[in-house]
């Protein structure tokens, strides 16, 4: 039998060696596969960890800090809002008080103007009243004195040759000076003047050469003080039928 035709006969030792090599190859293959699987799982885990880290919410401490900050901001805003509301209320009250004060000032100013006007009118009335009282007092005095003057005039007419005449004339002059100082003037119309009913009192009508209705003679002089007639002049009036 030739060498080519010879069949290799494995010995037990060779079989064990082949088995061991096969087992080693299988284990190596398994280890490689396991390594690749482990690397793949590790890469996937790292990728998952990275994605989880990107999407993971903030920590509890950070959340509490954020909530505390938000609460503080909200509380501060509420405090500011309350303060602004209080200031606005104070401003409204101040404006209302100012408006009331302005109205009160305006009312007091109006009252003061009325009081001043009333006082001015009162002063004018009091002044006129005093002047009227003074005038009436003077008029009353003059009305009491004018008859005395008339008596003096009549005394002079009757006692032309009397020794008392100079004294009476002197007294009459002084009397007239006093009346003049008081603004008193005698009403002594001239004969022939037209009768003035406001200043002349007709005692009787007489035949006279003067025109009819004119004054013939002054029986008793009248007196006027300013624009007031104290007493009318008593006169006689001509009928116009003279001799």
Image (cartoon, rainbow, N blue to C red):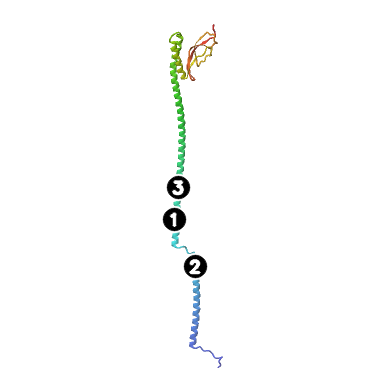
Helix, strand or loop at mark 2: helix
Residue 151 visible in this rendered orientation of the protein: no
Q: Nearer the viewer, mark 3 or mark 2?
A: 3
Outermost residue to the top: 243
Front of the two marks 3 and 1: 3
Image-quadrant location for residue 131: top left
Q: Which of marks 1 and 2 is nearer the N terminus?
A: 2
Label 3: how many Cα within 10 Å (few below 14, some 14–19, many 20+):
few
Residue identified by numbered label 2: 50
Residue 190 image position (x, y, % from top left): 52, 13
Residue in the image at 44% along x and 53% along y? 76
Which residue is at a point 48% across and 87% down the rendered structure image? 13
Q: What element carries label 1?
A: helix
Q: How far apart are marks 3 and 2 (CA)?
A: 54 Å
- 49 relative to 186, above or below: below
Query: Which quadrant of the rendered structure holds the C terminus?
Result: top right
| First reached walking from the N terminus: tag 3 or tag 2 | 2
Residue under numbered circle 3: 87
Which residue is at the front of the view, 226 or 113? 226
Quarter of the image that includes the N terminus: bottom right
Earlier in the chain: of badge 3 and badge 1, it is 1
Q: Which residue in the structure is indicated by mark 1?
A: 72
Could you say whether the residue bearing mark 3 is in a helix, strand or loop? helix
């Amino acid at each position: 039998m030739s060498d080519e035709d010879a069949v290799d006969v494995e010995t037990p030792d060779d079989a064990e060696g082949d088995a061991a090599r096969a087992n080693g190859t299988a284990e190596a293959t398994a280890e490689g596969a396991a390594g690749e699987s482990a690397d793949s799982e590790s890469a996937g885990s790292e990728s998952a960890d990275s994605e989880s880290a990107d999407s993971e919410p903030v920590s509890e401490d950070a959340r509490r800090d954020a909530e505390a900050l938000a609460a503080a901001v909200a509380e501060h805003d509420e405090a500011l809002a309350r303060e602004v509301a209080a200031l606005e209320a104070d401003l409204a009250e101040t404006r209302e008080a100012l408006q009331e004060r302005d109205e009160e000032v305006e009312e007091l100013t109006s009252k003061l103007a009325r009081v001043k006007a009333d006082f001015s009118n009162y002063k004018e009335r009091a002044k006129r009243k005093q002047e009227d009282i003074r005038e009436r007092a003077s008029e009353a005095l003059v009305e009491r004195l004018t008859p005395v003057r008339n008596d003096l005039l009549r005394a002079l007419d009757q006692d032309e040759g009397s020794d008392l005449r100079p004294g009476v004339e002197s007294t009459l002059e002084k009397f007239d000076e006093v009346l003049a100082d008081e603004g008193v003037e005698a009403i002594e119309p001239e004969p022939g003047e037209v009768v003035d009913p406001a200043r002349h009192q007709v005692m009787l009508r007489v035949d006279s050469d003067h025109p009819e209705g004119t004054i013939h003679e002054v029986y008793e002089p009248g007196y006027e003080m300013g624009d007031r007639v104290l007493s009318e002049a008593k006169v006689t009036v001509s009928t116009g039928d003279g001799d």
